[in-house]
Image: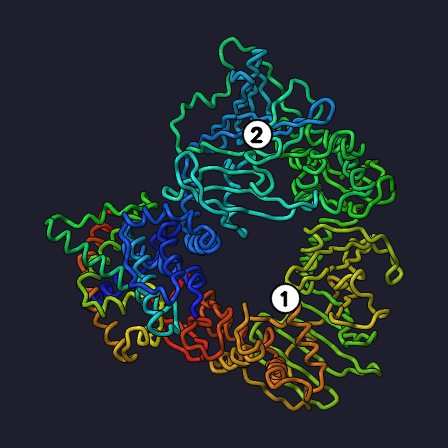
Amino acid sequence: MTDWQAVVGRHTALVWQTAYRLLGDYEDADDCVQETFLAALELSRRQPVRNWPGLLARLSTCRALDRLRQRMRDTARREEPVAWSAVPSVHAGPEQEAQAAELSDRLRVALTKLPPKQAEAVCLRCLNGLSYREIARELDINSTAVGRLLHRARARLSELLAPAISAERGRSCHGK
Amino acid sequence: MESDELARSELVDKAFAALRETPVPGGPSPGVLSTIVEAGGVSGSDLQPITLRTRSAKVKCMRRIAVAAALLVGVCLGVLHFADQGDRGAVFAHVLEQIDKAKTITWKTTYYTKATSQDGKRSWIKTETAQHAYQAPGLYRDARFDDEGKLRQVEIEDVIHGKKLELDYQEKTATLHLFRGYPRDAGPFDWFRHAVKGNLEWIGKKRIDGREANGFREAGWDKANNEPWSSDFWVDAKTKRLVTHHVPGADVFDPDTHPAHNNPPEKEWSRETVLGHIEHDIVFDAALDDAVFRLEPPEGFTLKAERRREVTEEETIRFLGILAKYYDNTFPDQLSPVAVTSDKLNAVEAKPKEDRTPAEQKLFETVEFYKRPSPHRMPIGRFRDEHTAEGTWRYLGKGVQLGDADRIVCWYQPKGSQSYRIVCGDLSVRDVAAQDLPLSVKAFEQMGQAKTVTWKTTFYARRGSKEGKTRHFAYQAPGLYRDVALDADGEVRSIDLEDNVHLKRLLLQPNEKKATAYQLTEPSQPPRGPLTMALKTLRTKNLEWLGTQEIAGREAIGFRHGFWFEAGNYHWSYDFWIDAETKRLVRYQVPGSDVFEPGRQAVEEHGCFVMEDIVFGAELDDSLFRLDVPEGYALTAERRVEITEEEVIEFLGIVAEYFDKTFPDRMPGFDYGEEHERLQKLKAMPKEDRTPAQDRLVETIDKYMRRWLPGPGPTHAFLQHNTVEGSWKYLGKRVKLGDAGRIVCWYRPNGSETYRVVYGDLSVRDVAPDELPLEVQP
């Protein structure tokens, strides 16, 4: 019998951080946490869960990516530029932080353009620090496939983020 | 092209790093948590399909919190606590940033005191609110009000330039105090920096002035009063701004729940007890007119300028006496950093005047007197800084009885004077010439610069034995050492020659006509002389006077530096004996005789050594130090000790096996403390009584000891010679041996661009610096 309260108590931080980092929005992250836990609970009633952190990391990543994609679709429908700058930042001010925030926003957009499995794998690896073996277990694929997914995801992300390189260079030139 | 690809790849890492470092707010809303926990409470038989609630549903759910309170309160607290801990760094970093960057700060403080009625039967709480303003650097303004809310008193202080203006609005007078300023000012909220370094407890969320805030508590034990102590601070959950600061925390004093909080005030009172204060209405970068901090009296005020009060020698000595009386007629162990801790002073202050001893009352009054013009400086520090030549103040009062005319409490050289002043235990003062001081600056220079030193050292290292073994040493600058060991008949058993500059060692064994040459991996003796550290300790640390004794027919004066060795959790000391005439060190014992008495006590856990017959500047023939193989000796060359990565990783595994197949919290040194003691006990055990893991550890450490490596095991030598300095990071805490998914450590081999990352299963992987899971110092 799962001690559900203990599971919630132990892993809320993990789920919340994953959701908030990917979504950058309190309300959306709040919803994502709720969806994640309730999905996990439903799952745990069907089959025993061996690795709660792994499962919750995957579910929160999936749910957050779903929301990001939904946001992109909504934005495209409204034909408005993505309002990433509206994401509240508690660290507004210094230039480095502004650059980091901009880069995070670009990454969020880029993640929505990856095939879902690639996006999940790269988030589990780079945001949640899961090992290849853990990712393989969570995505039900083998470790070699994880390596392939990650390679493709990184290649695609580097293309999608490329414009930022010229922007960075421009900034450093102006800096002089 | 290649560089573009590299830049792109780096950008992906950078972007993820930026996302990982995104500050995360405190945690999901309580409504969401209640929904989640509530869902788990549905029993299996009632199982319904779970429907995901939208934000509007969450609001309804929040209203139901009260119904589910019994179930939720405990777990929600736990959950939020956990969630907030994860965010703690980001939240506090933001507050710290505000504190550091603020050019101005305004805030209010409400002070709470408990007043007791004339007959002592009733009490009520009195409050007074003061307004404060701060402008960086170092400008403060405090305003106090009377019962009707009229301005009563204003204090404007420039702590850097040492000026304070007191304005009395009732008397219309202004008093200007001058005092020695401080070069730096940390600001009024520097306490926060220290608070967040310690262990904090998350105490919940509450609404303060319409804003939701997270509360944190810094708690400890007030040793002076033997009671719990705490302070609480509340941070706005949304803006991460500091909202209030409660001293003490609500667990000690809460103005809303204090038994006397609703009691009606009376006109007359017999006693007041300070309960605490709350800082609130904190505004960073408030718009403030410079005039707020102007150190000039307003129109209509009479200025009474008070000259900067100089602290005289007489009052400094009087203060030493007050301190000694407070400590039961014994001078304090130390004056620096403090002679009396603030805990002790607070404990005195907390007592009603009639309950204080005369010594406590006198100390309290004196401290209050000196606090007024200069809040943090007591007369001794001021006198030392203002009136004595730099570096000449020495305090030796530890253990000296008040009234003892034969014991020195301190000495100093007044500015512009050629001679020194010595203060004795009876508070008498006399002039002495520099050469007549027990410790002479000139002698320190001579000892430190001596080209040669000779001495003998007796090592008391054999457990259970009182016997020591004596060896004769000679040193020649730079870095040459000669160590001669004699056998029981006084015949030379070995001559060990070391060149600690060129890292060469030659061991001669005359009986066997054998010479062995070694390449050292690091200096085994201090290249700048055998007593470099000892002299530094003697020159700079707190010392205790040990009296005099005859050593080799001459009078010697003893000093001890004793301290608590935190890492080993035991007391340790060094004893120094100085020739009364030459002022040179003649005997040095580690540990001091308060820990171990050589010759009288059998060696237990810690050995001891005594350096004696120390002669500085003896005439020595250069040939004594030559690393030449004498005629007729057979030379064996030991290869330079090379440690391989495989050896280090094998050792890590052996250590983890020893700690029940789990990597320890930190890489153990096995050279002091409990680890050392445990290892010594293991060594003393018969081999068959040791477990295989214990035996393997003991054998391995012995094996590396035989290779003359620095530190037990191969790790230290490997890191020193094979890796980039500062690149080693140990993360093995609680990692299970065999866990391929957890990192134990990483390091960058010399000449390599990538790091080697060692995992719990002892596998190793090459990783680029920016791929490492934790930031690496460039």
Q: Which mark is residue B704?
A: none
Q: Regarding mark 2 in the picture, which secondary structure is present there?
A: strand
Q: Nearer the viewer, residue A150 or A73?
A: A73
Q: Position of residue B397 (x, y in %)?
A: 78, 45
Q: CA distance from mark 2 to mark 1?
A: 57 Å
Q: Is residue B706 visible?
A: yes
Q: Quadrant of residue A110?
A: bottom left
Pick the front one: B353 or A91: B353
Q: In this view of the protein, which residue sits in the foreground, A118 or B755?
A: A118
Instruction: Tell me whether the residue at label 2 lies in contact with that at label 1, contact meaning CB atoms closer than 8 angstroms.
Output: no
Give percent across and percent down for residue B394.
Answer: 72, 45
B403 up-or-down from B14: above or below:
above
- For disc 2, the chain is B
- Give the image location of residue B751, x and y in percent: 39, 72
Three-letter amino acid code of the residue under disc 2: Tyr
The residue carrying pointer 2 sits among few (fewer than 14), some (14 to 19) or many (20 or more) residues within 10 Å by Cα, namely some
Q: Which residue is mark 2?
A: B111
Quadrant (top left, top right, bottom left, bottom right) of the N terminus of chain A: bottom left
Asked if residue B34 lies left or right of residue B299, the reply is: left
Kindly identify the amino acid type of the residue bearing the numbered disc 1. Answer: Pro
User: Which residue lies at the image location 45% right of the left edge and 62% below the top edge?
Assistant: A6
Q: Are marks 2 and 1 on the same chain?
A: yes
In the figure, is residue B553 to the left or right of B709? right
From the viewer's perspective, is residue A56 above or below residue B583? Answer: below
**Residue B294 as seen in the image, left or right of residue B128:** left
Residue highlighted by disc 1? B526
Q: Residue at x 66, y 40 (%)?
A: B342
Say whether residue B775 is visible.
Answer: no
> Mark 2 or mark 1, which has the lower sequence index?
2
Kindly indicate the quadrant of the structure image that contains residue B100: top left
**Where residue A156 sits: x, y (%)?**
19, 67
